[in-house]
Image: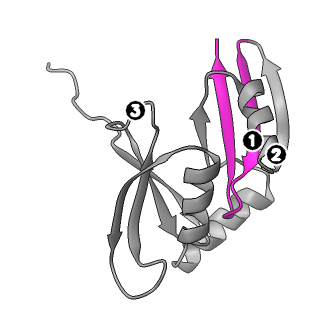
Amino acid sequence: MTPSTIRITLTSVIVDDTRKAEAFYIDVLGFRKKHDVPLGDGPDDRWLTVVSPKDPTGTELLLEPSGHPAAGRFKHALFSDGVPYTQFSVDDVQVEYERLVELGVRFTQKPVEMGGVTTAVLDDTCGNLIQLIHQG
């Protein structure tokens, strides 16, 4: 049997405002814009993806507007329960935590070591909690 060739090329986070998300994910977190395609007349009517500067041809993150009522309820429920929507790997959680705190990012969980894993959880200002993780 041939091994699967399935791979993740795109994932998304549901955001309240794509302009605000664009500023946070690019200017604060340091992602690079990959695609910004207008899809209509409204400010959130766009296909906006970002990528890691360390892997510009890698997995894209779609900043998906929360226009569908169920999407907004789902996002709000996760946020209210303190559950991160997704996670991003970093080289050093403590270093990234300190850098982002200096930029005014609010964390709901400071760096915590759990065995060989360190995590921290930040508020992306767009309705999501994002977990940072480093294994090693």
Write down the region rendered in magenta.
Answer: 116-136
Helix or strand or loop: what does disc 2 sit on?
A: strand
Mark 1 sits on what residue? 100
Q: Residues within 10 Å of mark 1 (few under 14, many from 20)?
A: some
Residue 121: say if magenta: yes
Mark 3 sits on what residue? 55
Quarter of the image that includes the N terminus: top left
Depth check, front residue: 62 or 86: 62
Helix or strand or loop: what does disc 3 sit on?
A: loop
Identify the amino acid type marked 1.
Leu
Depth check, front residue: 35 or 80: 35
Q: Label 2 to label 1, Cα distance in Å? A: 9 Å
In the image: residue 3, left or right of residue 65:
left
Q: Closer to the observer: label 2 or label 3?
A: 3
In the image, farthest residue toward the bottom:
41
Assess whether mark 1 and mark 2 are in contact (beta carbons under 8 angstroms): yes
The first of marks 2 and 3 along the sequence is: 3
Mark 2 sits on what residue? 107
Helix or strand or loop: what does disc 1 sit on?
A: helix
